[in-house]
Image (cartoon, grey):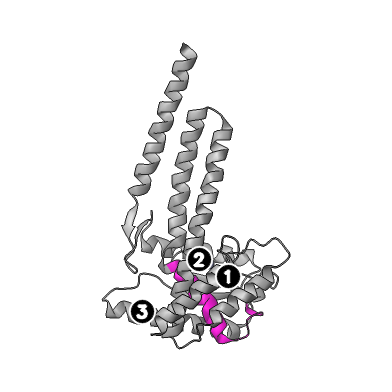
Amino acid sequence: MRRSSGLKMRFILGLIMAGIALISYYGKTQTNPLTGEKQQVGMSPEQEVAMGLQSAPQMAQEYGGLYPDNAIQNQVKTVGNKLVNSFEETLQSAGVNNPYRFDFHVLRDPQTVNAFALPGGQIFITAGLLSRLKSEDQLAGVLGHEIGHVIHRHSAQQMAKGEFYQGLAGAATAASGSQSGAQIASYVAQIKMMKFGRDDELQSDEFGVRYMIQSGYQPESMIEVMEILAEASGGDMNRDEFMSSHPSPANRISKIHEHIQTYSR
Ligand SMILES: [Zn+2]
């Protein structure tokens, strides 16, 4: 009797906690000031900028620091800024201000073939990836994709999702009274996040293609970047930002072709 009422209590408690997680998640709904998308994000763009600036030095440190060649750093900044300027032209014609502060950095790490963006606009490319690129257009492809992640607020979205799933995991623990429930919930959360990750990648590819065209770069170079990354990740287990949760290269490349059609008009 006592035991079954205890179970019932736990179940009800679990439901309440799941409800709280849902309410707090959807309470974070914001309209992206730059793209107009409705998103669940717990931070303001200014907080994203601050968080990115604060974590940039530590991020750099984890990849051997910044590449010690100012000429190369400046080349990468020039290409990145060209894309940002094109995007800002589009924003200006729509009367929207860009709250993000972009900067582009080359990391010293020659082994890792990767690029990534912190929330708010700090963008990194490893020397390992940069050395494999054969044209400025390909570099524009990599940076354009990363700028896309910032503009679409993908990191902030992932953080809000993470908090939501943590809330659910807490609910599962309460409902089952054991750790395995929490483990399952967190497993499911990872799969779900991976699925969202794929959409995010496609969205960033689209952004990259659009502003490559607007900046005068060859958008087909984005496809070459996909090929370079696929080649680099062949064989070893690779958890790169670019390759881990990505859609199949064939699917991605066919989408890129569609975007080239759309934005070349
Ligand atoms: Zn990406």
| Residue mark closest to the camera, 3 vs 2 | 2
Q: Residue at x 46, y 40 (%)?
A: 168
In terms of secondary structure, where does tag 3 sit? Answer: helix
Residue holding disc 2 = 201
Label 1 Cα crowd, 10 Å radius (few <14 / some 14-19 / many 20+): few
**Residue at the farthest right position:** 235
Q: Is residue 103 magenta?
A: no
Q: Residue at x 49, y 86 (%)?
A: 217
Q: What x and y, as percent, mark residue 56?
A: 53, 66
Q: Give whichever of discs 3 and 2 has the lower sequence position.
A: 3
Closest to the observer: 53 or 125?
Answer: 125
Q: What x and y, as percent, mark residue 13?
A: 41, 28
- Is there any visible trace of residue 208 in the rendered image? yes
Q: Residue at x 53, y 78 (%)?
A: 141
Residue holding disc 3 = 88
Q: What x and y, as percent, mark residue 207?
A: 44, 73
Q: Give whichever of discs 3 and 1 has the lower sequence position.
A: 3
Residue contact at pointers 2 and 1, CB within 8 angstroms: no
Q: What x and y, as percent, mark residue 218?
A: 51, 86
Residue holding disc 1 = 250
Residues rendered magenta in the picture: 130-150
| Residue mark closest to the camera, 2 vs 1 | 1
